[in-house]
Image: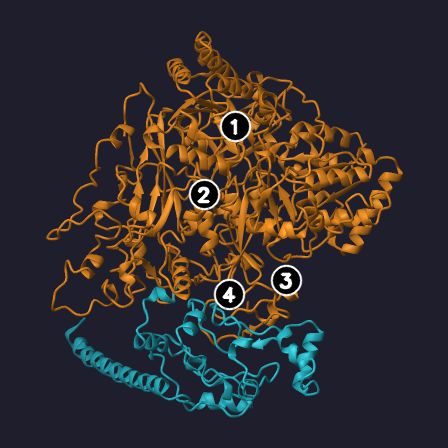
Amino acid sequence: MTKRRKWAAIPGLALIAVTATVLSAYGGAQAGAAAQAQAGQPAPSPAPTTTDTAALRAQRDTQPAEGPWAYSAGSSDQGYSPEQPIAFPHPQHVQSLQMNCLYCHYSANKSPDPGMPAVSTCMGCHTIVAAQKPEIQKLQQFWRDSTPIPWVRIHKVPDYVQFPHMRHVNAGVTCQTCHGEVQKMPRVYQYSALNMGWCVNCHVERKVRYDCSTCHM
Amino acid sequence: MSTDPGSAGVKRRDFLKVLGATTAAGAAVGCTSDRVEKLIPYLVSPDNTTPGVSNYYATVCRECAAGCGVIAEVRDGRAIKLEGNPEHPLSRGALCAKGQSALQGLYNPDRYRGPMVRQGNGLVPTTWENALQLLGAQLARARSGGAAANAAFINQAESGSFPAFLDQWLAAFGMPAHIAYDADATHAAMEANRQTYGVAWPRLDFTAARLIVSIGADFLETWGASVPQQLSFADARAKLADAPRLVYIGARRSLTGLNADEWIAVRPGSELAIANALRDAVGGNMGTLDQAAEAAGADAAQLRRLAAELAAARPAVVLAGTTGADATDVALAANAINAATGAVGTAVLPAEPIASFERTAAYADIRALVARMNAGSVPLLFVRGANPAFTTPASLGFAQAMAKVPYKVSFSSYPDETTELCDLVLPDHHALESWGDSQPLPGVVGYQQPVMAPVFNTRATADVLLGVASTDEQARGRFGGATNYREWIAARAGGPRALADALVTGVADGTVLQGPAPTRAAPVPPSTPIQQTEGDYYLVVYPSPLLGTGAGGNKPWLQELADPVTKISWQSWVEIHPLTARELGVQAGDHLTVRTPTGSITAPAYPYLGVRRDTVAIALGRGHTAYGRYAKGVGVNPLVLLASAEDARSGALALASTKAQVTKAAEHSPLVTTEGSARQHGRGIAQAMLPAELDAGPVEHGEGHDIPGMPPLEFGPGLRSPVAADAQGVYADSGSKDKGMYDPEHWSGMAKRRWAMTIDLARCTGCSACVVACYAENNLPTVGAPWQGRATSPVTWDERPGANILKGREMTWIRLERYFEGGEDGSSDFETRFVPMLCQHCGNAPCEPVCPVYATYHSPDGLNVQVYNRCVGTRYCSNNCPYKVRYFNWFGYGEPDRRQYAWPEPLNWQLNPDVTVRGKGVMEKCTFCVQRIREAEHRARLEGRAVRADEFTTACAQACPSRAITFGDAADASWSVAQLAVDRRAYHVFEELNTYTAVVYLKKVIHPAPAAPAQA
């Protein structure tokens, strides 16, 4: 490298370094703010009140994107709220009928897997109850066809993460802590970021083991 | 499981639609949002199941005739792991490599999806209604023509009521009793046992023996019931100084031979002279020994010493498993010696026979059947669970004879060589989908139950038979009104209630249905004795310890698992002595053509110390021309070399009956081996000691293992590690920062535990069951299939079987290293040491500091953890690992749309949901089954208690039929491992590197011949 080129390179590299520092500080601050908002407030801004998928998508897409440098947040589906094959109203069942979450998600307290209600569980009531409503008729059609309902999955941690529901439920973590107030959601959306920073924050705060091999195996 | 709506390539039972949320082991690895997944609920939730929580069902393994008891772990309606049933009198909780692999038979992607019928040259799918109609019509035709009495049914030799049930059914249709065929069975020894003791297989108790002499009896492999024999042998070896010496007599050292303390290499065909001479010598007449030694080409002094030892050691047990034309005579001589040395009733227990082998037919029965088929007198042939077109010598002409049978029906679930020649295929359920029973010991019944819904549209053969019988006037009512086999079994067990009770443990008192003893075809003595056939070399053909005579070939685990003796996989080889190879100018991998009057094969040479200089040896099991994608076209089948010759008394196929011409061929193909070197080069990896040294007080643990400036710490796995020591305050600086979870007083309590493992090399036989258990538990991909190689150009691929392994890319978290000691000059006096090698979970791990992204680190409870999602694939860790136990994902073995995908549907149903399927470009290695550790911790926490000592163990330790592996918390003295880790035989591999491993090996104890000079 000639002397002249070297003198040209040093300011250039310095500029790149400064830019990177500023950008990462910006991203870090943003991620930190997001984490704060999630830890403190029950329902941040993306709480949708509409069931219009397009509107929800738009709402999600217009949120300021967290930069790719933000800690594990680049892949978060926070706010994701897909249309379901049957517009199942959680408020009706949980708030009006006072049904316990564990009635349908029957293994959340004893298995890593929370459990999805069998179609027969739905039909226990809906053979008679509200049988004429169009959504219930969809359900009955699934039952008559002996076809399970193809619910669209909303909450998912990557395959390399093991999340044991039962440990959390038995430790007194409410369903709403992670899933938000599902009892008030006409259509369920992903409330939390479900990324690693979000997990670890809670584990540190609550004095729970946060060694990598707690979740990654 | 969550699936794409479009990827439902396999028909699934609606009631077993399963849901998966967090535990989904979808093969796709990636981020959360790139595809829409479905959550599929049950239609009706089954009783007694919780999603994401395993159920365990006791059933019976049918991978060999022994019928060990197994426990199937079933998660969300799918069997994901097989383990031995601790309640079972034979297997006692252990399971061999073949048994573990039953899952890959269940989920084999090449299974028939439903019944098939011949149309022109091929088989086409049909419906069960149509298939059963065809079967009924053929039965009616045979009966009306009066030819039914000439029909034949070849069934796999199996333990239980089914053989007698089948004979009842055959009788109802006027057909003769079936032929219970087992190509792997050692008929000669069975015949001799029947003559001597009245039972086919006495149970063996090696712990009672003072000396074991095996004349070609590979009791750790295919000779008899390998799992109970291995358990007993390991228990005997664990007596250390008092352990019986094992002497192996044979032309080739098998796995059993490698476990022997001494090998007397004798010429094939001379075993009878040796056995008779030994019998005479035990009786006091040493006169014939020299003559026998002369005939065998063995050292007379060595034989005389053995005879003296045999006469002195009581009880001494002699086992014979030769495969020549005089095999029964050899076994009879061995039985006579056992009677003379007091072994009968102590080490050989005819009063407790292993009942599974009683009914087994011999090769002579098949040969007699072929003669009838060729004569055109067999109108109808049934085959179930056997593949005689592949497992009989080509010179017998089974396949050609099949062409002369008007109608052939197969009950096979796999497209094997025999089934492809059949006219109708009625695929049977896999054993894990079926009802049944077995008789392991007299008075004990093992019950077999389906552990999951059928994977494909198959039907249990017993149910098919009952269905056919129910529509037939003469057969109706013969089966007590049972409409299916479950009812029939339940009626035998004393009703559905009693059956349900028995299924809790899988075993109960009782007997299975016994039929009359079958009539056997008279054996034909071979026309030419072995000494007179042409050729330069004796040819020894032997069943592979893993693939048997071929049944294992379609299971990728067994193809990938290195042969315990030669460490070769995905390939056939010719074993030839190194000095003979040098004479022929042959290097390892140079092809050899082996020619006999009946045929010739060409395969790469493997120079092997454990074969006589005048002998070549070839394993059976490969060379399939059908049998699915994993078996077809891999290796060669040495049965083409054999004449159809029989042992004159038992009718067993004479495998060691011929000589062969061996010439060097032009080709060369590198050996697909997982072995780096067969020698230890002074590294002390597999250590051994003499019995005398056991009493010499505590053993020094090498030198240079104290860290300068650090006070010497007690010997123990990982406990001395700098990380642990630092956390415990030895290095601690009072002003230092928080030690976090590494502090034993930390609230997490993680650092209080120190997970560790001991491996007792005195027990280990090198059988490799642990390796397959690890494959099953930890979702290890097999990488050697011909389509899994790399691209050699944009359009061409390296399609050699095992191409990845040739490049050192095998994925085996635990591997069996096999080292030879001595014999550098080519002599037969060498010792073999097996050492299971896995991640040592070093307390001071060389891999950890070189990782630029902290993907590997030391957990507070002593694990060397690999975080897959953090790994960027630099492979520095692997470079720096002195044990070479880290494995890299060179291809996307877990991605279904890639050519290298390791689990084509439905093999992926077996994947363990608790373990990540690793992605491309990621390093992986043994985790000490961290998922089992965490699961035990979860369970304990939910039950409000601490993890109990020895509450759980790793997959390898669980499977081990030698009980060599012990896992647990070395920091808590109540665990077994804590005591074993400070055993006087304990050592760490490469201790001088200061790695502070958490795996502690216990030295093997060798028992040299009394007069031989001691060597260690």
Q: Earlier in the sequence, mark 4 or mark 1?
A: 4
Q: Residue at x 20, y 77 (%)?
A: A9
Q: Secondary structure at mark 3?
A: loop
For chain A, give the colour. Answer: cyan
Q: CA gap, disc 3 to disc 2?
A: 32 Å
**Which chain is home to disc 3?**
B
Q: Are marks 3 and 2 on the same chain?
A: yes
First reached walking from the N terminus: tag 1 or tag 2: 1
Q: Earlier in the sequence, mark 3 or mark 1?
A: 3
Foreground disc of the pair 1, 2: 1
- Measured in 3D between alpha carbons, the distance from the residue under mark 3 to the one under mark 4, in whole angstroms, is 22 Å
From the viewer's perspective, is the residue at label 4 or at label 1 nearer?
1
Give whichever of discs 3 and 4 has the lower sequence position: 3
Horizontal and vertical percent position of residue B760: 35, 40
Measured in 3D between alpha carbons, the distance from the residue under mark 2 to the one under mark 4, in whole angstroms, is: 33 Å
Disc ID at residue B562: 2
Residue A170 seen in the current view: yes
**Label 2: chain?**
B
Q: Quadrant of residue B385?
A: top right
Instruction: Categorize mark 2 by other alpha carbons within 10 Å: few (<14), some (14-19), many (20+).
Output: many
- Label 4 marks a residue whose chain is B
Mark-to-mark CA distance, 1 and 2? 34 Å
Tell me if residue B932 comes above or below residue B170 in the rendering: below
Residue B52 bears which disc, if any? 4
Image coordinates of residue B285 in percent, x first then y, are 45, 8
Q: Nearer the viewer, residue B693 or B476?
A: B476
**Label 4 to label 1: alpha-carbon separation:** 45 Å
Seen at 47% across and 16% down, the residue is B296
Look at mark 3 in the image and give the residue it sits on.
B10
Give percent across and percent down for residue B894: 48, 61
Chain B's shade in the image?
A: orange
